[in-house]
Image: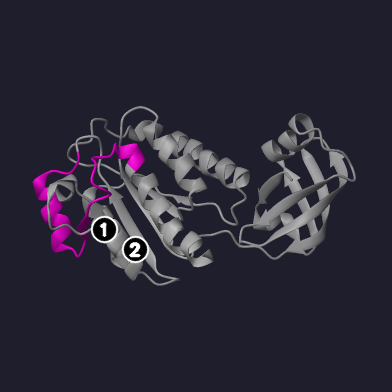
Amino acid sequence: MQRYFIPEQDWNEDNVIVKGQDAHHLTRVMRKNIGDHIICNHTKGKAAICEIDKIEKEVVQLHVVEWLEENVELPISVTIAQGLPKGDKLELVLQKGTELGASAFIPFQSKRSVVNWDKRKSEKKIQRFKKIVKEASEQCHRNQIPDVFHPMSMKQLIEESKSADVKIYAYEEEARLEKFQSFSTIVKKLKKGQNMLVVIGPEGGFAREEAELFNKNGFIPVRLGPRILRTETAALYALASVSYQFEELGCL
């Protein structure tokens, strides 16, 4: 069943209004008519099966048929801090990371980032990123849409990390050591309800001084398996590991 995230102001008890692009998609792309059902997500995480009552130009009115008792969010809140990569790799991380359960994304400028963030196009890019995570959340039936932060400097990222229960950074040098701290070891120590910040470097990895800065501020260097992963793969590996530990092993 098609799912849409509806802003809080468009809910009035058990009545819902779908506007703008979502209304256009609902009526022109999905060809929904009066009496058809869709799922509407409230911004606070609740979801309901709703029936279409009225269709006007760019506005669809619905009422709640049944509130759903569902929650597919990871029991651990995982924020992915992604060193700015080349091309459309960040968009891939946003889309697939949303499907795998990330709660937020923080792009950041690293010393070895090949690209520099264009501040003139910043707002336009952020709006595109938010659209990507919204559509991915609808597609995979998330209860919430991940936050997408404006790109940060290393200094800003360190400041933002102070609220995390656990903060790690993927360091390729760790993958070559015999005595290493594996990511899975960290995950097994986590408890439901905690929040974790996972920092992934750009294509060139982290400079030595960046690793030292992380170490001084309580970050744990880890390896993500024995192989060196591409920057766009590393975040997905981390999220899949958390999902397996808390969602799959718990069902066995």
What is the secondary structure assignment of the residue under circle 2?
Answer: helix
Magenta-span inclusion, residue 227: yes
Residue at which label 1 appears: 168
Residue drawn at 16 percent across, 51 percent down: 174
User: Would you call the spot at circle 2 few (<14 residues within 10 Å), some (14-19), or many (20 or more)?
Assistant: some
Name the image quarter holding residue 231: top left
Q: Nearer the viewer, residue 112 or 16?
A: 112
Location of residue 136 by image quarter: top right
- Identify which residue is drawn at 15% across, 60% down: 215
Q: Residue type at mark 1: give it.
A: Ile
State the residue in front, 173 or 25: 173
Q: Amino acid at mark 2?
A: Val
Q: Residues within 10 Å of mark 1 (few under 14, many from 20)?
A: many
Residue 55 in the magenta stretch? The answer is: no
| Circle 2 residue | 187
- 37 w.r.t. 48: above or below: above
Q: Is residue 47 left or right of residue 81?
A: right
| Residue at horizontal 53 percent and vertical 65 percent from the top | 251
Circle 1 sits in a helix, a strand or a loop, which is it? strand
Q: Which residues are magenta?
A: 205-233
Seen in the picture, residue 19 relative to 196 is either above or below; the reply is above
x, y percent for residue 245: 42, 61
| x then y, percent, for residue 170 | 24, 50
Which comes sooner in the sequence, label 2 or label 1? 1
Number of numbered discs on residues: 2
Query: Residue at left 48%, top 49%?
Result: 100
Q: Quadrant of the N terminus?
A: top right
- Identify which residue, 211 or 192, lies in the foreground: 192
